[in-house]
Amino acid sequence: MTQKRLEKSALVTRWLRASLVPLLLTGFASPMLHAEDGLPSISPSVSQSSGETKIYYENDTRMRGKDATGNRVGLSKFRNTLKVEHKRDLGDGWAFKGIFRGTYDGVYDINDEEYGKNAGGPINVSERSGLSFGMGVPGATPTSVPYGSSFVGPGIGLVANIDQIAFLSGGALTTTGTFSGQQNFNLASNPNQGLQHLGQRWNTGYSGTDFGNPGFGNLDLPVPVRPCDVDRRGCADFGGYGDLTSNALKAPEFNGRLDFIREFYAQKTWDLADGKQFNIKVGKQQVVWGRSDLFRVLDVINPLDYSRNSIYDEFEDTRIPMWILQGNYRMGASDSLSERNVQVVWNFDQFRANNLGQCGTPNAVLEAGCFFRAAKSAWDYGATIGNLAPAGLLGGPSGPYNPAGMAVTVPTHQAGIRNVELPNWSLKNTQIGSRFEGVSKDGTIAFSVNGLIGRSQMPSLRAIRPSALAFDMYFPRISVLGGSMDFNVEALNTTVRLEGAMTHGEELTDTSQSSATSRHRIWRSVIGLDRPTQIDWINPERTTLISAQFFWQHIVGFNETSVPNIGAFGYPLGGSNVKTGTVGWKDNHLFTLVVSAQYMQDRLNPQLVFARDIEARANIIQPTATFLYTDKLKFKVGANYKWQTGNMDRYAFTDGRGLTGTLSASGQPPGFPVDTGVGGLEALGRFKAGIIGSAVKEDEIFFNMQYQF
Amino acid sequence: MFRIKKHTVPLIASLVMGVVGTAFAATDAEIDAFFHPYAKGFPSAPGVKEGVVIDKGNVDQFKDVLSPRVYDQVKAGNTSITVGKQLTAAAPAAFVAASKKTAAKVKVQFGKGKIEGYEGGMPFPYEPSASDPNAGEKLAWNNRYSLEIPDDITMGPFVWEYRDGNTGKINRTVDFDPSYVSNTGHRTLNKPENLPGSDEFFNLLMLAVKSPQDLKDTVLLFKRRVDSSRDDDGQLYLGFQRRARRLSTSATTDPFLGSNAMIEEFRGFNGKVSDFNWKFIGTRNILAPYYSHKDAKLRDDYKTADWRAPAFVGKGQCWAAVPWSLRKVYVVEMTPKRADHPISKRTLYFDAESFHGMLSEVYDRKGEFWKLWIVGAGHPSGQLPAVAKKGIWTWDSGSMIDVQAVQCTTLNFRVSSLDPIPPNVYTLEYIRSRQ
């Protein structure tokens, strides 16, 4: 049987599982009276007294235009989803709800040159110095050299003693040494195939021509982009993604974490004295906190799956349900409040990170998955990194100060991500939170106070030796303390939503630290204003909803300085200054605006969403129109377009190459500066560009259809 | 010395009453008569007999017993009306007793939406007077506290159909199941106690959408304030967001979930009294859908083991196929004070016995006829046993017909119980935790 047939066979098996498992589950559950509402004194309506099953099919098809390379991407999603929901009473007041979901995304079969087994290809990494070309390396051009063939590298031309590299001072590359250790670089296991330049989807920094300097300031990291059954390089479990095979990408729910079980929980409510109640809900579920749309400030109990459709799907479909026990003590009214509720949430599931999307797939937000894969591949297999060192180190036509970039083939176990330290299941790695929610006596204000401790769902990269460009990935322990509130301003006919939280313990990459990371407190907050407004030219018969939100994030202890882009021996590379220190923005602001109208008994819903990342100067506009043809059949068409109102220079950041001893096994020699300011757009600029800025070349048109059987 | 002209006295009295309406010394006999409009027999009109069918061919002879816009619809051939039996279900004694207590001490700041001294029942349980400038608003207050909400109502399935007003094609079907409504303070039929929060809210509503897919798990929680000058409190839980969102003021005057009815139009009128100027037009005997469910033409859609809802017929199948009977009604005209309100006027018809706002003629901002609200009241004898035992008129069918957009929303009721509802269902936590 061919590999293709095997894959298809596995896919069929997964589909059968997708259809049969829910049916089996629903078929064997004992039919009991409905008790969902926990209202023993109320006779349940007849329609709810028995189990109820609903089946949905959804197709989501998306097309993209040209990416930053000028390549027309074409189909970026052909996602077919079957969802089964089942509710049933289990007796004795317990009620069950299950949601089962299976997805097949045909984009990996249909557009496999972009996202599947034929994605990527051989690449020439950037070498603005033309060193390899000058030395007659086959395939080299005056500005590039084939991956794995750079003149500087093990067993190729110049055998560099990279241990001794001090990029900015302290001696040139030598030709006498060898790489330390027994590491190697093997083109047989690490071929020039299935590769792309890191960031090529959204920027051209890898080419070495940005920022007005000739190379050294612009890192070119190659990254494998094919599914992990086709190409294992750089594959590791970064927290639910990063090591997925073709089939796992096509049908992502069918994995060891049983993600096809979207939700599976039971709940029961006990009536206590004085009208109080106690409710328990246990099982795989979503727990939603907060009052914001589009932003997650308090809504952080469940990690998020950005790989499904980046930020464009409803959170309900992209939250990753976890096995959670929650207890709710409904205390009723007091002298000052009309409602009081205390909720305790224990997420006892094994840790899950946010799924940022595997490299080589359509939705790799921030292209972080590509950065991680490139780094992991570099560690495991070695890599030819374009513009890694200044040609000045070897002298050359412009003398010792020549800043033109030189590609270096780095052997295994020198640079990149060594280990991914996913937290194992242990009591202390589980997540526990609590919320008090109250409603004022007259109902005009509803508020919550929330607290949560657990592991960060975003990774942190810690240098494995001082100032090294080699890391382990961690998910640090964090705590979140915040609250939310909503109220109406009657005079303005406006509902105000407030939400804020201070997170302790988040780790951010910090190029000024020898550990390459620093720990921060981060404040995130949202002010939301919702106003149904009568706009006669849109619809004279009803209001149009206008919803605006302002997001503010403040990093406490933020440390950033602006430095000239420095080359060898302090020779300035020219171009824009780059930033060094904490990666990100000290104060980041985003603005979102939603305008939503309704026509034809609310069956036709045109909507416009606009968002601007103010610091990144990145914008997105997404017009959509949803039409309910019948109660069971819904269509949605739309597009999203992103653009920047500044140039990408503002994302430029040092990348750690200034770290003396960066590639040294012994770490940073004492007395040298940690970072002296070599940088460009890659690899850290993505974290300043943000989700919108780093997707600026992912404009889409889309069509969505949903049918309920 | 001032000489006060004779006609000046009522003028001053009116002005004073315009600010604060004090308790009116209605006698017990007057109140009893008010609550038993058919004690001395049902009204009659020439030709109005059980079994008569009124259609465009003969409607002119029944013009006096039809509301103007219903007459227009019949005249246009959009529907016909079958005259049914006249039935009565007078207010329970406890409700009447509470009304007497309230009437003796209630004070309303007319035009301001403030009420004090309310202790159950209806605040103005006596015949309105054409000379009373506040008669219209008094009737609105009576409707607000009427037996239309007999302390508690549990419904389900409660199905709204959004129809094409020409073809009858159902474009959307929204099933609210379960649906609960409760009064909070001075309850008279069920546990005679005040629920928590009754000093702030007099009435609570929870509607949970079971289908269709795009609205599934949406829940409306709506709390009406005792102080009718303040905005009511609304929360809308959105299933797809899994969050409750506070409703802003104007949400009550938007089509509710795309239907042809606003939240403000539930029950004929479900808004702030102080938002409108009220005018009492008069007392009339007109045909209205008051009937026994047993006499309605029933349909199989949404049927349960114990219930079938009335069918819909006529143009666009917008009209419940139920008998209409001659009823005594109070006619009130309400005009909004807000310039941006989507209507210019409603003419409301309050049934004299049940005080349901069973008929409402709605005019758009240009003053043109826009919508017709009709809610059929089912006699207790035709209702489910748990409802029949309370002995009061109950929601049984309904339509909101938009004559301009040529659409209608038809309402299929199944009132399953009038027994007490745990107050916990009217909480944010409850609507969130239903999923």
Image: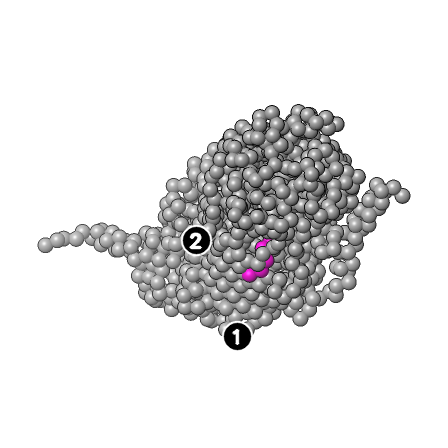
Residue farthest to the front, as pictured: A176
- The amino acid sitting under disc 2 is Phe
Q: Chain of mark 2?
A: A
Q: Position of residue B373 (x, y in %)?
A: 51, 47
Q: SS of the residue at dot 1?
A: helix
Q: Relative to A394, is B181 above or below?
A: below
Of A694 and B88, which appears nearest the observer? A694
Q: SS of the residue at dot 2?
A: strand
Q: CA distance from mark 2 to mark 1?
A: 31 Å
In the picture of the structure, the residue carrying the numbered disc 1 is A273
- Residue A612 appears in the rendering: no
Q: Which residues are magenta?
A: A453-459
- The amino acid sitting under disc 1 is Ala
Left or right: A449 as drawn, with respect to A31: left
Residue A455 highlighted magenta (yes or no): yes
Q: Relative to B364, is B122 above or below?
A: below
Q: Position of residue A179 (x, y in %)?
A: 70, 43
- Residue A436 appears in the rendering: yes
Of A418 and A40, which appears nearest the observer? A418
Of A245 and B310, which appears nearest the observer? A245
Residue farthest to the left, as pictured: B1
Tell me how the rendering is colored: one colour
Q: Position of residue A457 (x, y in %)?
A: 60, 53
Q: Residue at image x 64%, y 69%?
A: A93
Instruction: Give the mark, 2 or 1, whose residue is nearer the N terminus.
Output: 1
Total number of numbered discs in the rendering: 2
Residue A487 got which mark?
2
Few, some or many residues within 10 Å of mark 2 (<14, 14–19, 20+): some
Q: Nearer the viewer, mark 2 or mark 1?
A: 2
Q: Quadrant of the N terminus of chain A?
A: top right
Q: Residue at image x 46%, y 45%?
A: A587
Left or right: B41 as drawn, with respect to A21: left
